[in-house]
Image (spheres, rainbow, N blue to C red):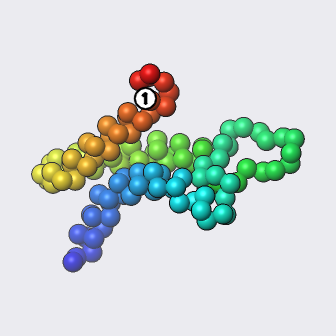
Amino acid sequence: MKYSSLIRTFLLALPILWVLFLWLGPIVYPYLNHYDDFVYDSFVEYTGDGKKPSGFMSSGLMLDIYLFIYFPSLFINAIYTAYKKLWWWFGSYVLLFFSTLVSFASSIGFLG
C-alpha cells in the first residue's frame, strides 16, 4: 500500500473515528477510574467545595474541534468522495451528518 493511499484513507476516516470516539468515550472512560466525567464544563466557575472538575476534555475544546475540524472535514470529504465516486465513504458521511444534526436538534429541544 502506498503512503498516499494510507494518508487518504486516514483523512477519509478521521470524521468517522471522531464520532466513534465521542460515542464510545462516555461508555469507556468511567471504567478507567481516572476522570470524573468524559467532558467537563469549562464555562462554569466552580467554587465552594474546592474540587476542580476533571474530565478527559473540556467542553470548550470539544466545541472548537466540532467547529473547526469535524464539520469542515466532513464537508470536504463528502465532496471529495462524491467527485471520486467512492459511494461507501459518501454514504457514511451522509449518515454521520444527519445523525449529528438530529442529535444536536434533539439536545436543544427542537425535536420535542
At 59% across and 62% down in the image, what residue appears?
A: 31
Please identify the quarter of the rendering in which residue 48 is found.
Answer: top right
Residue ranking furthest to the left: 85
Could you say where residue 8 lies in the image, as x and y percent from the top left? 27, 63
Specify few, some or many for label 1: CA neighbours under 10 Å numbering under 14, 14-19, or 20 or more.
Answer: few
Looking at the rendered structure, the number of numbered marks drawn on it comes to 1
Left or right, 89 with reference to 42: left
Is residue 85 placed above or below 110 in the rendered structure? below
Amino acid residing under circle 1: Ala
Left or right, 91 with reference to 20: left
Residue ranking furthest to the bottom: 1
Could you say where residue 49 lies in the image, as x and y percent from the top left? 86, 45
Provide the secondary structure element on which disc 1 rests: helix
| One can see residue 4 in this view | yes
Left or right, 25 with reference to 77: right
- In the depicted view, which residue is nearer to us: 26 or 65? 26
Is residue 93 placed above or below 56 in the rendered structure? above
Could you say where residue 32 lies in the image, as x and y percent from the top left? 61, 65
Could you say where residue 71 lies in the image, as x and y percent from the top left? 39, 43
In the picture, the quarter occupied by the N terminus is bottom left
Residue ranking furthest to the front: 31
| One can see residue 57 in this view | no
At 48% across and 24% down in the image, what residue appears?
A: 109
- In the depicted view, which residue is nearer to us: 13 or 102? 102
At 41% across and 55% down in the image, what residue appears?
A: 20
At 42% across and 36% down in the image, what residue appears?
A: 103
In the picture, the quarter occupied by the C terminus is top left
Judging by the rendered image, the residue that carries numbered circle 1 is 105
Please identify the quarter of the rendering in which residue 36 is found.
Answer: bottom right
